[in-house]
Amino acid sequence: MMKMEADLHIHTTASGHGYSTIKEIVEAASEKGLKTIAITDHGLNMPGAPHWYHFTNLISLPRVMQDVEVLRGVEANILDLQGNVDMPEPVMTDYLDIVLAGFHDGTGYSGSTLEENTEAMVAAIKNPYVHVITHPGNPKYPVDVETVVRAARDYNKALELNNSSFIVRPGSFPLCSEFAKMAKKYNTLVSINSDAHICYNVGENAKAVALASKEGIRKSQILNSSAHNLSEYLNWHKQQSSLVLKKAQ
Ligand SMILES: [Zn+2]
Ligand SMILES: [Zn+2]
């Protein structure tokens, strides 16, 4: 069984429908031997989500708690076909270590066809602030898997295998399997996360890990399998995105 050193997708009470505090989450992560976690509450358009002050004020968190490194993040919402997300750019550049982005109901995204969903997801992959696309295998927002996997490979972004999907997003298994197969084929970066909304689920990823193993995903292509490789990736990404943003000015 492959072991992940980091869990990059965790919600706190600040998400409005999460049930644990950062302290409870850190305790759980420490007990489970995780080296790194990311606190990724929902972006601004999610009903019940926090004000953007929540995200800028993450600087008040200690960098390390109970021997667990705590990254400051967001699970932003993909808003449109241009790949915009619901987090002000200065907050992402100056305050956050990691930006996840995905489709969620009731957050303003109005695409409905497979073509539109694919276009929007590829645009989010190209968004220089985004690191990980969350639950791309959600059957509520079907996409062309090969197109998305190739875009993620080209832009070196990670596609998530989300352990909670098998519980809260019914029908996810076939599409997630297809994502895993294609990710293996193209050697695309993958991220395996709990998407915990309560401390007990922090680090829980057995179903997603089993799927990844079955489809032949290599440990080396999983963004969060090694805390060391993760931090190298985040540093590399920071340099890349500042280059992209400079060019765009
Ligand atoms: Zn949530
Ligand atoms: Zn989500």
Image (cartoon, rainbow, N blue to C red):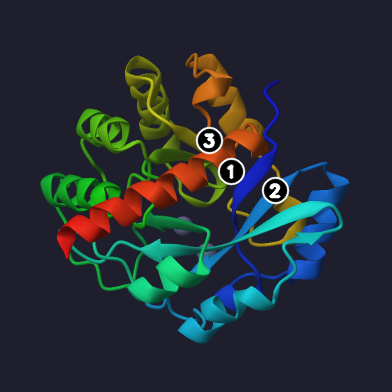
User: Residue 107 lies in what quarter of the image?
Assistant: bottom left
Closer to viewer: mark 2 or mark 1: 1
**Residue 212: % across, % down:** 53, 24
Q: Find disc 1 in the rendering and name its residue.
A: 231
Residue under the point 78% across and 51% down:
29
**Residue 234: % across, % down:** 50, 47
User: Residue 28 lies in what quarter of the image?
Assistant: bottom right
Q: Find disc 2 in the rendering and name its residue.
A: 36
On the picture, is 171 further left or further right than 118?
A: right
Residues marked 3 and 2 touching at CB (< 8 Å): no
Mark earlier in primary sequence (1, 3): 3
Residue under the point 44% across and 55% down:
100
Q: Which mark is residue 223?
A: 3
* Between 91 and 49, the one nearer to me in the picture: 91
Mark earlier in primary sequence (2, 1): 2
* Between 220 and 161, the one nearer to me in the picture: 220
On the picture, is 31 further left or further right than 36?
A: right
The image shows residue 122, relative to residue 127, as above or below, that is above
Tag 1's secondary structure? helix
The image shows residue 124, relative to residue 57, as above or below, that is above
Tag 2's secondary structure? strand
Whether residue 111 is visible, yes or no, is no
Q: CA distance from mark 1 to mark 3?
A: 9 Å
Mark earlier in primary sequence (3, 2): 2
Q: Amino acid at mark 1?
A: Ser
Give the class, few, some or many, for how many residues have Cα within 10 Å of label 2's Cα (few <14, many ≥20): many
Residue under the point 29% across and 38% down:
155
The image shows residue 232, relative to residue 44, as above or below, that is above
Q: Amino acid at mark 2?
A: Thr
Indicate the quadrant containing the C terminus: top left, top right, bottom left or bottom right. bottom left
Tag 3's secondary structure? loop
